[in-house]
Structures are given as structure tokens and as C-alpha cells.
Image: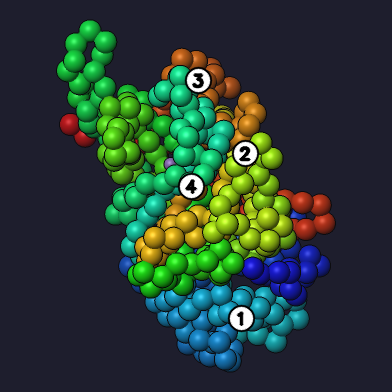
Amino acid sequence: MVYLNETHDPSLQSWVASANVAENGFPIQNLPFSVFRIAGSSQAFRPGVAIGDQALDLAALARIQPFTGIAQEALDACQATQLNALMALGQAHWSALRLELSRALRTDSSLQSTLEPMLHNQSDLEFALPAHIGDYTDFYISLHHATAIGKQFRPDNPLLPNYKWVPIGYHGRASSIGVSGQAFARPVGQTRPGAEDGTPGFGPCERLDFELELGIFVGQGNDLGERIPITEAESHVFGLCILNDWSARDLQAWEYQPLGPFLAKNFASTISPWIVTLEALAPFRTAFQRNADDPQPMPYLTSDDNKAAGAFDIGLDVLLSTQQSRADNAEPALLCRSNFKEAYWSIAQLLTHHTVNGCNLQPGDLLGTGTLSGPDQGQEGSLLELNQGGKEPVKLPWGEERLFLQDNDEVVLRAKCSKPGYPTISLGECAGTVLPAKF
Ligand code: MN
């Protein structure tokens, strides 16, 4: 686990003035990674680190060899179009690079004049997927979501008996993952037969939903046949992003048994461009707690560090705008406000469980947490929970209602960590738009 060090000092300030503005979300204590280029250009994408409203070009920085040792090795891995090579180097390299970037971006750094020409306004940039994602697994780690959704599909038996013992997941599809700004056509497919006749429906999805999730980017992987013990699991995590696991509920209801989600999920998934490292999130760790009435995790899913600090306090918001609201210049509606700390399983437990059978994870693999609903009203991380199983439309402040998403609706997920006496650490945002179905 990464503990606090000089990069977390809340009094650190940057010579990039916008980084010191309260609540800007990308202070010098954050330093998240993405890949970017000038918007609309034909430049190669290259890695960058966010500082205030700027992004520092790490490929350009690498070429002048400003650092030494493993920090420079890590920077050299940024002469690439994606972050996989940096991810593969491991925790010691990431941490050494973070320390040197923190020092270089601090007020009075001797590198200021060298770095200034390598900064770009984030508003001038476009982003690509930060890594080649070889495999994508989506988990189901909110007990509150699993119970609420289980009630819709199985009113008499909402929570299956395995839930409190084994982190449930399914193998998703990496090819349809896009970066924030993704716009995708409403999926078409088979839907559950109506009551009167046994023939399934076919056509555009009528129950299109979002899922509020976080994504976990794997750093160093493990060899096929080898396990990652829970005491080492977090050192294999490069960082976290925001993830929208768009879901076609009517397709899902018809296809999900017996093998789980398939076409209801793999038409699109959207992630935020910035990956915030676990090191940056260290000040927001909290105890991982398991209700005394519940089974305690098996020994391979238990460690002292995981109990003491395996959860993260990350606030999560879902916002919705529609064609009408944008035409009216209305503010997007806040549909949900939740927190990652409510999750039933921790990040370390997910990695350890994923590899307990010898399955090999690789740098750039993405693990989704599953929908991060909280226990209370207003914390529902999907429309299927907000509308109580498709029964109660959500009323929007400008007068429209939504049972499920309509064409041209835009969903924006946001995530940030806040506490008194520490700068806000933002994960940025993850936006996606539903386009009409293609017939
Ligand atoms: Mn999901």
C-alpha cells in the first residue's frame, strides 16, 4: 500500500496558477494521467499529466531527460501513444515519477521555464483511451444495487446466496469501450416476450440505462497460473477512472440467464480520460468494514491493510441533460449522489479474487466496480433503481420525465474526493450521448 509522503503535503503549491485555485480538482497533489493531442489535429496521441487547467506533455518532457534513475525510466515509458508501458513498470516507478513531477511543478522549481512550453490548455485538447485495454471485467460490488436490481428480476429472491461470499463479475468486451464524449447508437436486439404470446420482441432498445461505476486500471500483471495475494494486490493497480456501463435493460431481461450479460452491455461503455493513481487517493482511504451479521471474507480476501484502509471515500454524481434542457439552457439534472466507500468488496479483493484461479491480468486491463449505488434514496446509480423497476418516471426540473434514456440524452458522471484541510482531488468527468438507433 502507498502511504502518505511529501507529494501529499496539502500546503504544496504549483507555479501553474490554476492548480492552486480552490476546488479546481487537479492540484499538484493529484497529477492524474491521460493521453491527449491538440483537438482536431493529426498529431500522435501522447501521455500527459494534469496540473490545474493544463496538461503537461510527458513525451516531450521525456526527450530532454530531466530526471534520473527509475523516475526517468518511467518517463521514458511515456514516449508512446498509450500508457501500457508505464503501467507495466510497477508501483516503484510510478511513485518515483510522481515525486519528480511534483517537485518539478512546485513553486520555485528550477524546471519551470523548461516545462512551460510543454503545457497545453486542457480545453484545447482531445483525449483517447489512455491504454490498450486487452480485457475488461465488470464486477457487481454494491450490495445496495445488487439487492435493488435483484428485486426487479427476482422479487422473491433478490440477493443470490453467493453474493456475500464471492465477488460477482462477468467478462465484458473491451472493443466497444470509448473515452468521454463517446456518442453511440441506441442498440437494437431481442427483448423479453410479452405475457400473451411466447414470441420475443425485436427492435430498438426501449429501456436504455446508465450505470455509475469506477474503472480500475491494472498496472503490472501476473503470470498465467500465478495468484496475486491480497497483500500485494494494490501494487498491481495503476489507478482509477470513471466508468459508465450503459445497459439495455429489455435486452438484458431476456438474455441474462443462464450465462449473464451479453449484448445488453457490450454495445458501448464510456470511461473518463484521466486516471487518478491510488497514490494520489491515499489521503481518502477509509476502513473496509463488513457488517458483523454478514459472513466475513475468506482468508484469501482478508488482510490487515485491507481492513484498516482498503476502501476509498470518493463522491460520485450523475447528471442528465436532454435536447430540450440544452435548448432551454437549463442546468443538467442531478439524478444521483453516491460514494465508493459504500461498496461491499474492496479494490484489493477484486484483483486477488480475479487471479485466485491463476487467471493472468495484463497491463491496461480494466476492471469495472459495478454500479455504485448507496443505501439511501438519491443514491441510486442507475435509472432502473431510480424508476423503481420501470414504474415511476424520474421528474426532471425543466418539466420532462424519464423512465429510461431518450435519444440525444447526455449522461455525465463525475467523481471527486473532498475533505477539510486537503485540496479537492477530481477524477474529472465521463460524458456520453445516446444517438438514434440505426435500422
Ligand atoms: Mn455494470
Which residue is pictured at 66% across the width and 36% down the height? Answer: 293
Q: Nearer the viewer, residue 158 or 94?
A: 158
Quadrant containing the C terminus is top left
The residue where tag 3 is placed is 388
Q: Is residue 310 above or below residue 383?
A: below
Dot 1 alpha-carbon crowd within 10 angstroms: few under 14, some 14 to 19, many 20 or more: many
Name which of mark 2 and mark 3 comes first in the sequence: 2
Q: Is mark 4 within 8 Å of ligand 1?
A: no
Name which of mark 4 and mark 3 comes first in the sequence: 4
Quadrant containing ligand 1 reads top left
Name which of mark 2 and mark 1 comes first in the sequence: 1
| Residue type at the position of mark 1 | Ala
Q: For the residues labelled 2 and 1, say whether their Cβ atoms are less than 8 Å apart.
A: no
| Residue type at the position of mark 4 | Pro
Name which of mark 4 and mark 1 comes first in the sequence: 1
Local secondary structure at mark 1: helix
- In this rendering, which labeled residue sits more in front, label 2 or label 3? 2
Residue 145 is situated, as x and y percent measured from the top left of the image, at 52, 33
Q: Nearer the viewer, residue 354 or 325?
A: 354
Name which of mark 2 and mark 4 comes first in the sequence: 4
- In the image as oriented, which residue stretches furthest toward the top? 196
Q: For the residues labelled 4 and 3, say whether their Cβ atoms are less than 8 Å apart.
A: no
Q: Is residue 194 left or right of residue 9?
A: left
The residue where tag 1 is placed is 96
The residue where tag 4 is placed is 167
Residue 45 is situated, as x and y percent measured from the top left of the image, at 39, 69
| Residue type at the position of mark 2 | Asp
The residue where tag 2 is placed is 294
Q: For the residues labelled 2 and 4, say whether their Cβ atoms are less than 8 Å apart.
A: no
